[in-house]
Image (cartoon, rainbow, N blue to C red):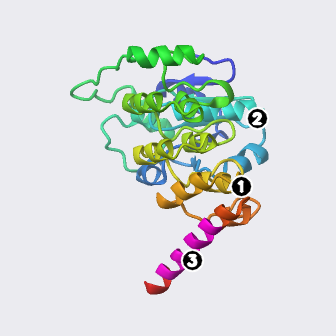
Amino acid sequence: MADKHFQRLHPEQARAWLAERPNALLLDAREARHHAASHLAGCTRLDGRNHERLLMREPKNRPVLIYCYHGHASQTYASMFSDFGFSDVADLIGGWAAIDRQGQLQGPQQAAEVLAGASTLPAPPVAKPVSAVPPALAAWLSAEGLDPTRPEAPGQHGNTPLMHAAWRGAADAVTALLAFGVPLEAVNHDGNNALWLACVNGEPKLIRTLVAAGVPIDHANLVQATALMYGASAGKQAVVATLLDLGANPHLVSQDDFSALDMAASVECLQLLRAATRRQAERATVH
């Protein structure tokens, strides 16, 4: 099955695709702990800090295959690489779950072997039914110009419905999307996640909801900027205060080596960040 920008491949198709492209760049869009447990041999993990290097430095004619957990976030990344001019991009339908349906694989896996065996793996004892989109959520998606049948599907600029709801401050929609189980690791074309968009909106309760659900608080985008850096640079005192209270790391730096403290655009944000860095320094001294 093909998209106008990139291909979507089932495991058995991916095996043949890779056999014809021995120099393909393999990218794992899962978290570090899951990548460490099992991954395709020779792959590179997308960690939120290496996107720009890969997008800008890899030859645009080099084939790229991306996989994530279930084949949701990989579509966003595949679209991103296509938009940056890569001519031969594919993602894995079903993600790592389609390869390791029983959760048995450990360590690096040779692509040819594991992809060939994926189609013959026994199915789980009880198949999980595909959940229907609740009517209220489907109505909201439709009203916002999004696909009412695919709450995880990215729209304009690669923003997923969760990102869109966060940006709009639509708390009920955010709650419904989280309850539906949309992927929390998805990023848009700039490498920003749903938490960043919530910080653009500026509602502290929304920020707390997303962090509590598991959206990474210290995720870095294509220029290695975090949500805390954005809040500081925008002079959003409530955003900075909320993120710091939730444990955001004020010491991280962007690709230009600027921290959130360096970017503070208001006295209030500057004071909050100074106090946070001072508290961390004091705790480090005690321990």
In the image, what residue type sits under mark 2?
Answer: Phe
What is the number of the mark on residue 278?
Answer: 3
Residue 124 magenta-drawn? no
Q: With respect to residue 18, does 30 lie above or below?
A: below
**Quarter of the image that includes the C terminus:** bottom left
Q: Earlier in the sequence, mark 2 or mark 1?
A: 2
| Circle 2/circle 1 CB separation < 8 Å | no
Q: With respect to residue 76, does 135 lie above or below?
A: above
- In the picture of the structure, the residue carrying the numbered disc 1 is 233
Circle 2 Cα neighbour tier, 10 Å, few/some/many (<14 / 14–19 / ≥20): few
Query: In the image, 29: left or right of 129?
Result: right
Q: Residue at x 46, y 47 (%)?
A: 208
Q: Earlier in the sequence, mark 2 or mark 3?
A: 2
x then y, percent, for residue 167: 60, 34
Distance (Cα) linking label 2 and label 3 = 41 Å
- Tell me which corner region of the image, top left, top right, bottom left or bottom right, holds residue 80: top right
Provide the residue span drawn in magenta: 271-283
In the image, what residue type sits under mark 3?
Answer: Arg
